[in-house]
């Protein structure tokens, strides 16, 4: 009996020693909230950094997670932005679709059976609101006290969390998470936390900043979107 107790004690001590020895390897650094008295200055600095972006072309990968499905739906495409209010989000794989905002107009296209089709934008006000927000975020304008409660977290990079205030908005969106690059002059990702535990992650890569972009690619009056050269 004494031998068994001694053996169990040694095993427990060995387990504790192992855990203590390797604890730093498994420790995960927790994000640190930015105090409110520092938040305004941080937002001003970020907007100043982003203000240097007049045009942007970036590839994107979207991961759509729907709670009732086990698999993540992955789409690839690109984003083109021209300050102050022109934006084109286009998916090329596994399907083709295009969403364009030009000033206060919004256009939607889908490639079906070998042809582009112009679609109804559905809830235009909500779609326009989301697209206008993305346009503002690409310019570093995250602060909108009438629309969002905002928080900031610092880990490896800076992250902003936006919580909608409007009741109609909250029916569709719980929060947005905006991840900045290390230089704090561009977005690395956007996470849209929808209702019912659904969420969408958009990651940006292969950025081209301040290259010439013609206005015609944001034209939405034709039956199909204007073609864009790959990069």
Image (cartoon, rainbow, N blue to C red):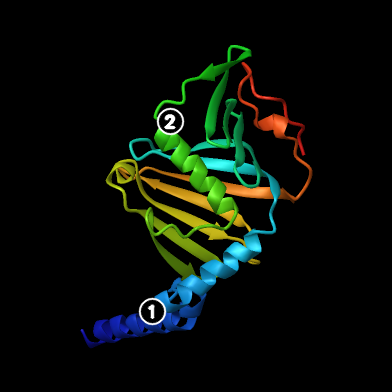
Percent x, y of residue 61 = 59, 42
Percent x, y of residue 90 = 61, 33
* Alpha carbon separation for disc pair 1 and 2: 59 Å
Residue 50 occupies quadrant = bottom right
Residue 182 occupies quadrant = bottom right
Can you tell which mark lies on residue 124? Answer: 2
Judge the density around disc 1: few (<14), some (14-19), many (≥20) Cα neighbours within 10 Å: few
Can you tell which mark lies on residue 5? Answer: none
> Which label lies toward us, 1 or 2?
2
Instruction: Determine whether 59 is above or below 11 in the image.
Output: above
Instruction: Determine whether 153 is above or below 10 in the image.
Output: above
Mark 1 or mark 2: whose residue is earlier in sequence: 1
Residue shown at 63% from the left, 57% from the top: 186
Residue 10 occupies quadrant = bottom left
Instruction: Determine whether 97 is above or below 151 in the image.
Output: above
Taking 211 as reference, is 225 left or right?
Answer: left
Residue 68 or 139: which is nearer the viewer? 139
Give the position of the C terminus as an image quadrant.
Answer: top right
State whether residue 82 appears in this view. yes
* The furthest residue to the left: 1
Residue shown at 29% from the left, 81% from the top: 8
Residue shown at 60% from the left, 32% from the top: 91
Judge the density around disc 2: few (<14), some (14-19), many (≥20) Cα neighbours within 10 Å: few
List the residue tagged with mark 1: 15
Percent x, y of residue 189 = 55, 52
State whether residue 185 appears in this view. no
């Amino acid at each position: 009996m004494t031998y068994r107790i001694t053996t169990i004690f040694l095993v427990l001590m060995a387990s504790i020693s192992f855990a203590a020895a390797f604890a730093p390897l498994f420790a995960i650094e927790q994000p640190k909230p930015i105090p409110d008295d520092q938040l305004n200055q941080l937002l001003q600095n970020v907007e100043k950094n982003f203000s240097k972006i007049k045009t942007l072309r970036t590839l994107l990968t979207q991961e759509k997670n729907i709670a009732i499905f086990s698999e993540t739906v992955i789409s690839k495409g690109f984003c083109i932005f021209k300050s102050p209010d022109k934006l084109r989000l286009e998916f090329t794989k596994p399907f083709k679709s295009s969403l364009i905002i030009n000033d206060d107009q919004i256009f939607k296209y889908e490639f079906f059976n070998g042809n582009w089709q112009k679609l109804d934008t559905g809830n235009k006000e909500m779609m326009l609101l989301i697209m206008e927000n993305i346009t503002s975020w690409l310019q570093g304008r995250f602060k909108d006290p009438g629309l969002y409660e905002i928080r900031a977290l610092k880990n490896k990079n800076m992250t902003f969390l936006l919580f909608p205030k409007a009741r109609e908005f909250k029916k569709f969106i719980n929060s947005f998470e905006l991840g900045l690059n290390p230089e704090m002059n561009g977005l690395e990702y956007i996470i849209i936390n929808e209702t019912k535990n659904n969420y969408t992650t958009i990651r940006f890569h292969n950025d081209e900043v301040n290259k010439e972009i013609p206005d015609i690619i944001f034209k939405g009056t034709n039956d199909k979107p204007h073609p864009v050269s790959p990069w």
